[in-house]
Image (cartoon, rainbow, N blue to C red):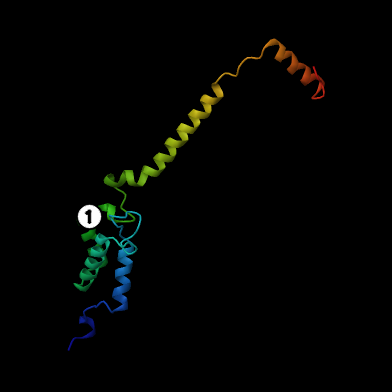
Amino acid sequence: MARAGEAVPTENDPVTAARAVQLASELRCLVCQNQSIADSNAGLAVDLRRQIREQITAGRSDAEIVDYMVARYGDFVLYRPPFKATTLLLWLGPALLVAAGCVVLVRQLRARRRREQPALTPEERARVERLLLRGPDARS
């Protein structure tokens, strides 16, 4: 008879199921890319969830399971990849895009401001002066 400390987790074990769901929610579906493997119905996500359950049953820790997935699929499989040279663009990319957008916006605004306004004819200039001196009721 097995002791409590030697019990093998099963799919019906709520602790094991919760642990599998937690691990699956930390890993990105490589097919969908915007969903975790817990939320995805893609074939690869189903296989990865099965692998997680198998590794939990084999007695591996959460860190060992995540390390296995990273070794097999790379840092992209993590929703929160580590900050290192190979993931630098992943972390800084959004900020770089915003900065580039701001530079383009400032340049466009400056270029618009620099464009010369068409010069007024002498008649138009005289009319403007009359309007400014007499007010909007002045008619020519």
Provide residue 117's location: percent of width, then percent of height: 60, 19
Provide residue 11's location: percent of width, then percent of height: 26, 76
- Horizontal side, residue 102 vs residue 126: left or right: left
Front-most of residues 29 and 98: 29
Residue at far bottom of view? 1
Residue name at image x 32 percent, y 49 percent: 83
Q: Which image quadrant: the N terminus?
A: bottom left
Element on which disc 1 rests = helix
- Horizontal side, residue 58 vs residue 110: left or right: left
- Horizontal side, residue 123 vs residue 34: left or right: right
Please name the amino acid that badge 1 sits on. Tyr
Is residue 93 placed above or below 13 in the rendered structure?
above
Provide residue 108's location: percent of width, then percent of height: 50, 29
Provide residue 15's location: percent of width, then percent of height: 31, 76
- Residue of label 1: 73
Residue at far front of view? 140
Is residue 41 placed above or below 83 in the rendered structure?
below
Is residue 39 placed above or below 85 in the rendered structure?
below
| Corner quadrant of residue 21 | bottom left
Q: Which image quadrant: the C terminus?
A: top right
Residue name at image x 48 percent, y 28 percent: 107
Front-most of residues 12 and 9: 12
- Horizontal side, residue 64 vs residue 127: left or right: left
Is residue 82 placed above or below 131 in the rendered structure?
below
| Corner quadrant of residue 119 | top right
